[in-house]
Image (cartoon, rainbow, N blue to C red):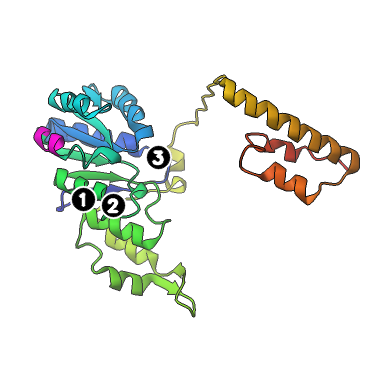
Amino acid sequence: MPRAGRCLIGDEMGLGKTVQAIAAAELFARHFGVQRVLVVCPTSLKHQWKNEFARFAEREVQVIHGLRTARQLQYATESFCKITNYETLERDADLIAAWAPELVIADEAQRIKNWNTIAARALKRISPYAIVLTGTPLENRLEELISIIQFVDQHRLGPTWRMLDEHQMRDEVGRVVGYRALDRIGQTLAPVMLRRRKAEVLTQLPERVDKRIFVPLTPEQRLHHDENHDIVKRIVSRWRKTGYLSDTDQRRLLRPAKHAHGLQQHLFARPRN
């Protein structure tokens, strides 16, 4: 952890940012006496974090959920790690402060597009020690990277106007069309950011494991599926007979709404000439 007490794990997706953060939390617990860790993540990832903690660390973990009264009881219950989502940070600021987490893990940090929002300001007030995770720290807009780094170390990159002036490329009307000298930014961030690409660690990765889970359709999903199936079937049948696909039919096949739900694979069933 750098002097600022915060760091950014910016590995590409699939390289185990979650496991690294859990390992760091375990090291803090064993060697520095940390007893309360707060994980802040998107709602959809809360139970995934709980499962990962159960898999890699023998610690009591609690997912914060429900109405305010339920969340109040959950924060009052002692546990090593509590997992909440960004949307409830401001509303639960008093509950979190009372629980007093000693380490905060902020996952999917790039989802906070503006780090001056209520959620971001609440996150900054929680704990001086934080591990920030994002899979796309250098691929997004430079302003987003700057805002995330300002949370990690507000003095690391200097004034925003200077950073933008040095690294943005603009056209004749002032629109941003690209960036330059991003390697210098990487060097500046090296003390506070761990950044690995898959190509760099490919030989160290275990074999890929694919797990398929089949879930039955709900009645409403089945209704839409069957309607779209009939529409696509008629279009493809006409296409096979005539060898021609009208602009209207192409739009119906590609439309990302009712007429397309999961059936665009029919586009690849083109008749052989």
Q: Magenta stretch: residue 98 in it? A: yes
Q: Count residues near mark 1 (Cα–Cα under 10 Å), then give few for <14, some for 14-19, many for 20+.
A: some
| Secondary element type, mark 2 | strand
Q: Tags 3 and 2 in contact by the CB under 8 Å rule? A: no
> Foreground: 149 or 228?
228
Taking the image as shown, residue 270 lies to the left or right of residue 141, namely right
Q: Nearer the viewer, residue 229 or 192?
A: 229
Q: Find disc 1 in the rendering and name its residue.
A: 121
Q: Sequence order check: which comes first, mark 3 or mark 2?
A: 3
Structural crowding at the residue carrying mark 2, measured as other residues with C-alpha within 10 Å and reported as few (<14), some (14–19) or many (≥20) = many
| 8 sits left or right of 33 in the view | right
- Residue position for label 3: 15
Picture layout, residue 241 above or below residue 169 = above
Vertical position of residue 214 compared to residue 247: above or below: above
Above or below 184: residue 15: above
Q: Which of 137 and 45 is in front in this view?
A: 45
* Marks 1, 2: nearer the viewer: 1
Whichever of labels 3 and 1 marks the residue nearer the N terminus, that label is: 3
Q: Mark 2 points at which residue?
A: 193
* Amino acid type, callout 3: Leu
* Amino acid type, callout 2: Met
Q: Is residue 73 magenta?
A: no
Residue range of the region highlighted in magenta in the rendering? 94-99
Task: Say which residue appears at 35% left-offset and 57% top-offset.
Answer: 144
Q: How far across and how far down the image is residue 81, in percent?
A: 20, 29
Q: Which of disc 2 and disc 1 is earlier in sequence?
A: 1
Q: Which residue is rendered at x = 61% and y = 40% of the image?
A: 257
Measured in 3D between alpha carbons, the distance from the residue under mark 3 to the one under mark 1, in whole angstroms, is: 29 Å
Query: Split into 4 quadrants, where in the image is the C terminus?
Result: top right
Residue 3 visible in the displayed image: yes
Name the element at disc 1.
helix
